[in-house]
Image (cartoon, rainbow, N blue to C red):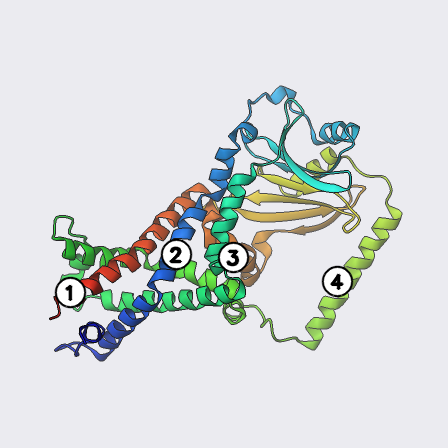
Amino acid sequence: MRLFKSLYRKRRKNESVTKYLMWLIHLWLGLLSSGIVFVMCLTGCLYAFKNQVIDFTNRDKVYISSSPDNAKNPDQIRKELSQQNKELTSLLISDQKTKSYIIGYRENLLDKSAYYNQYTGEILGQADIGANRFFDVILDIHRNLMMGNAGRQIVGGSVLVFCVLLISGFVLWLPKKMKFLKQGLTIMLKAKFQRFNYDLHNTLGFYVFLILFFIAVTGLYVTYPWVKNSLILSLGGSSINTISGDNEEDAFGGLMEDMLKKQDEKKNLKNSASINTILQLADQQLPYSAITGIEFPNKDNPRYVVIKTNTQNLLGMMLPDEVTFDKTGAFKTKELFSDKPLYKQFTALAKPLHTGEIMGLPSIIVYFLVSLAGCSLPVTGFLIWWHRLKKMK
């Protein structure tokens, strides 16, 4: 009986119907999903610094002594690897002189990757798998509680509930009068525990509301096709379930034309341009300094693909620009992130927007703190309800 009373109360005097219903929804759904929401936020906190932790655990391979005068160019790297019966297939060039390259190569019909010291020509070895395995487990818990598709649906449902909790919490936070606004924005650090806990839940929830809601929605984008469809439509794209006859013909025609061109390139182009030449041509098309990745022609794609991470924008976001060349170095395609329609920009950045990698370390720190605050909300909310339960006779 006491438990039932703790889950219900009468509508207070002068309390709006909306706030009363929001209180009930917030309480019931909060208790129902608090455990999973806590796990989602905690695993999000742990996953936030994945790249930094992996770089730290591989610091003897990632960070090297700089010697610009002795840096090997990509053609020299390919030649030296070839002498070791290794075929260079890709290269990731950092924009920091003290960080090693990451090379992809084929050896004995196996595709491998490793850190490479561009100053000494030494293959430093592959990344330590311990950290990668740890983050793979964290990611598996975050996505589906390590329960496959069933867990994925449980997580998706809980995140959907979390979105409702954030909205209802914001409605409950709204002060009745402006004179109460300061109280809603302040945490009384010297107050008794129950008051401090309430302020922590109420005020901290308000401060992280928008970013947490954005993180939750981008998470739902991955889980539910209807969310993905709704977001694409809202950003000016076409429904993923709707196919227009004319558009389909145009798209199919363009795809076939591109495929035929590539087939001709495979047959006719025998002499390959040097990697240095390709990178110089790419710099002419994308004239800025940035992290640069290059994939070499292979049996599936006869073109050089160069991707540069452009951070020259107001917020310093990492936006990918791509340019391709055939084997002779003839320019083929150029795809600037800024030229893409809004819905394509969003789909290209959905993952880094969700994880906080979009602006590098500064945004990762912000996401970590927000996720940490998200961890506290189920705990402080539960303690508020538990105190209410204990007070009832």
Question: In the displayed structure, would residue 229 be above or below residue 333?
Answer: below
Q: Nearer the viewer, mark 3 or mark 2?
A: 2
Q: Which residue is mark 4?
A: 255
Q: Is residue 127 left or right of residue 189?
A: right
Dot 1: what SS? helix
Residue 146 or residue 226, whichever sits in front: 146
- Pick whichever of labels 1 and 3 is earlier in the sequence: 3
Q: Where residue 26 sits: x, y (%)? A: 28, 70
Q: Quadrant of residue 209?
A: bottom left
Res 21 → quadrant: bottom left
- Name the kind of residue labelled 1 in the image: Lys
Disc 4 versus disc 2: nearer the observer: 2
- Drawn side of residue 42 relative to residue 279, left or right: left
Within 10 Å of the Cα at label 1, are there few (<14), some (14-19), or many (20+) other Cα atoms? few
- The residue tagged 1 is 390
4 or 2: tag closer to the N-terminus: 2
Kind of residue sitting beneath label 4:
Leu
Question: What kind of element bears circle 4?
Answer: helix
Between circles 1 and 3, the one closer to the viewer is: 1
| On-image quarter of the C terminus | bottom left
Residue 242 higher or lower than 148, as above or below: below
Dots 1, 4 in contact, CB < 8 A: no
Q: Dot 2 corresponds to which residue?
A: 39
Between circles 4 and 3, the one closer to the viewer is 3
